Amino acid sequence: MANLKTVSKKSKAQSMGMHTEVLTGRTQQKFFNPDEAENFYYFGTYDVDFNKRTDLDVKDMTAPEANKEIDNLMSQGYGTIVIKNPQGKHSLGVGILNKLNLIFEGSLGYFGMGSCDGPIVRINGRVGWSCAENLMAGKVVIEKNAGSCFGAAIRGGDLICKGSVGARTGIDMKGGTIIIGGDAGAFTGFMMQRGRIIILGDVGINLGDSMYDGTIFIGGEIGSYGSDAVDAELTSSDQDWLRRKLKVAEIGENFDVSKMKKIVAGKKLWNYDNLEPTEKKGAI
Amino acid sequence: MAKKKNKKVAKPKAKEIKGQLGKKKETAREKMIGQSIGYRYDVNLLPDYNKLTPFLKKYIEAMGWDDLNWLEDVHMGYEEDRPAVFCRNANGWVTIPRSIKLPNNQQDRDMIARELLVKFQMSPKHPLVDLKKAYLKF
């Protein structure tokens, strides 16, 4: 085991003074000027042009190699990249924090497009589990079906599947919009905390189980409601928003949104104090 | 002549508006744990696209999106009685400069919050820029 006392080499973070900072009180630092020049991109990201297009054949590449090559192409200013022969590889297109137009000519395996922030992605095939997990911003469109945990823990952006999806869609989502053109499996919206799910078809059992907040719109039949999921009134502003969002998603433009069901959290699970004595009794 | 009875006129109580900035009453439990239970504003409020600011229109166009995208989930809340917007990247509240006068409706306030949040996140002075310099591995 390394003797920590004898380790004298400072990490980059330590030399920047990050470990000597007093962590009490609140930061009062002024981080930006609201009138400063317009800048729409994260500091240090690539300046790409949507009109600059290239192809990338990933047939003989591993996923890390393919992802590094996508990064390399963005650094050269390519704003539209077409990926040929993805052949169901896992973890393709992850961690893109850039404006980009990415097109996959085929299907992806699991964890495709995870942890992205900004790109517009079109997948002309199917996807495995946890597609676009932790998506922060951007738009991901899947032309066929998707596996389970579709859009797990997404925080923002639009995630669209034109076909059907498996179980636990939008599990633990904290923002963003998931739109499904077909049916969805059991436990859709399980433990969701914010955001919106739209399903034009039917949905399986335990819809919105243990949801904390957020909204689910269903066009078809509901297998059963989960714990604390309740019906709510569909307002005219909901309907306007649904029409606009379906147009963005390129599906269900003629769908009658006025007949959709709206499901929200009953907020009974928020009463932690009432639950605690029972839990304590059980523990003793 | 009959005396007029001086009835005490009760002052009308200030009407508490749900989600009003800094006005939500904390429960005893919230006071004890020092944290708020539940969101402090309506997180499900859908944006009114008629209120888009010119800056946000340019941002949507620059990113190639069709709408506000992730900004649909951004609302103006409050922190310590001051209007603020939550930055998920810095995991903290960014208070709105006092120089900015806030309009009287949530939709307009939300648009201001979105604009300021984009400016904050894209600024080279954002706290994550230093973290990236220190910890970026590849």
Image: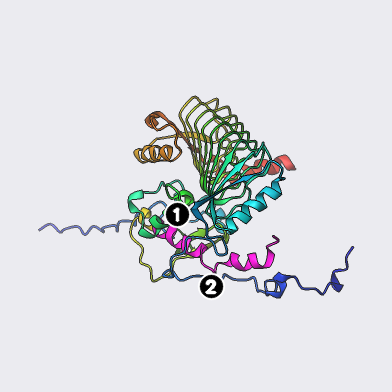
Q: Which residue is mark 1?
A: B75
Give the chain letter at badge 2.
Answer: A
Q: Is residue B80 visible?
A: no
Kind of residue indicated by mark 1? His
Specify whether residue A179 is painted magenta. Answer: no
Look at the numbered disc 1 and give the secondary structure of its residue: loop
Q: How many marks?
A: 2
The spot of residue A246 in percent (x, y) is 43, 37
* Residue at x 69% of width, y 44% of height: A280
Q: Classify residue A255 by image quadrant.
A: top left
Q: Which residues are magenta?
A: B110-138
B134 vs A94, nearest the viewer: A94
- Residue A135's mark? none
Give the residue furthest to the left. B1
* Residue at x 57% of width, y 70% of height: A26
Q: Are marks 1 and 2 on the same chain?
A: no
Q: Seen in the image, is A237 located left or right of residue A56?
A: left
Q: Is residue A177 visible?
A: yes
Q: Which residue is mark 2?
A: A28
Look at the numbered disc 2 and give the secondary structure of its residue: loop
Give the chain letter at badge 1.
Answer: B
* Residue at x 12% of width, y 57% of height: B2
Kind of residue indicated by mark 2? Gln
Q: Seen in the image, is A72 located left or right of residue B22?
A: right
The spot of residue A238 in percent (x, y) is 39, 39
Specify whether residue B119 is painted magenta. Answer: yes
Crowdedness of circle 1 by 10 Å Cα count: few (<14), some, many (20+)? many
A107 vs B55, nearest the viewer: A107
* Vertical side of B112 occupied by A167: above or below: above
- Helix, strand or loop: magenta stretch: helix
B73 vs A266, nearest the viewer: B73
